[in-house]
Image: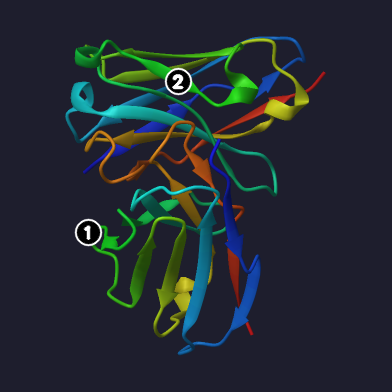
Amino acid sequence: DIQMTQSPSSVSASVGDRVTITCRASQSISSWLAWYQQKPDRAPKSLIYIASNLQSGVPSRFRGNGSGTDFTLTISSLQPEDFATYYCQQYNTSPLTFGGGTKVEIK
Amino acid sequence: EVQLVESGGPFVPPGGSLRVSCAASGFTFKNAWMSWVRQAPGKGLEWVGRIKTNTEGGATDFAAPVRDRFSILRDDSENMLYLQMNSLTSEDTAVYYCTAEPSRGWYGLDKWGQGTMVIVSS
């Protein structure tokens, strides 16, 4: 199975800060990577697919980058509604696998 | 508007069986790959398994921890998805989310239901 490793596991930031989350795959997944946002007691929401493509309605302050084994999710200017947990997921190979999550907390 | 509404649970004894359901609307269900994802209390997301379209033979695949115990069924006439879970243990206690891939593997798990809780306990 492909292992997905996210870092950091948590980050404290203020409104307006730039935040970058890293996701590393244990083997190449080309660009078959998605990012999800989950708020407490809510279902996850898809943000980005094929590493860098925003789902409809996702603000442009979210940016995904990378290919192969190394990927990033950047939030350019953190907004109050962005405080949540973020997960990467590879869908290059079954079984689909998620990273452990990164919790973005208010500083 | 896409809607995925899960039902079933919450309580089942260890060693028991349970079927959870997902009612889909707002997209062409028969053309979508459908997956189940679970989340144990306070933990991260874990993909459980997927079923492809009946045009693709309804092929299924599963994560290793559930491969020999769980099955996924779809009823395209009713736009329903099912997860049949057998030989349940406390490790299976989680919120179970129904997800849809209308793009069949291009956009990831882009549609999610609200989840249904399953508690395996005596």
The amino acid type found where label 2 is placed reads Asp
Residue B2 to residue A105: above or below: above
- The label on residue B61 is 2
Label 2 resides on the chain identified as B
Q: Is residue A74 left or right of residue B101?
A: right
The residue beneath circle 1 is A56
Q: Which quadrant is home to the C terminus of chain B?
A: top right
Q: Position of residue A79 (x, y in %)?
A: 43, 81
Q: Position of residue B11 (x, y in %)?
A: 68, 22
The residue furthest right is B122
The mark lying in front, picked from 1 and 2, is 2
When asked about the image quadrant of residue B104, the answer is: top left
When asked about the image quadrant of residue A101, the answer is: bottom right
Label 1 resides on the chain identified as A
**In front here: A17 or B105?**
B105
Q: Is residue B60 left or right of residue B106?
A: right
Residue B53 to residue A75: above or below: above
Q: Residue at x 40, y 17 (%)?
A: B60
Residue A77 to residue A20: above or below: below
Q: Position of residue B97 (x, y in %)?
A: 48, 35
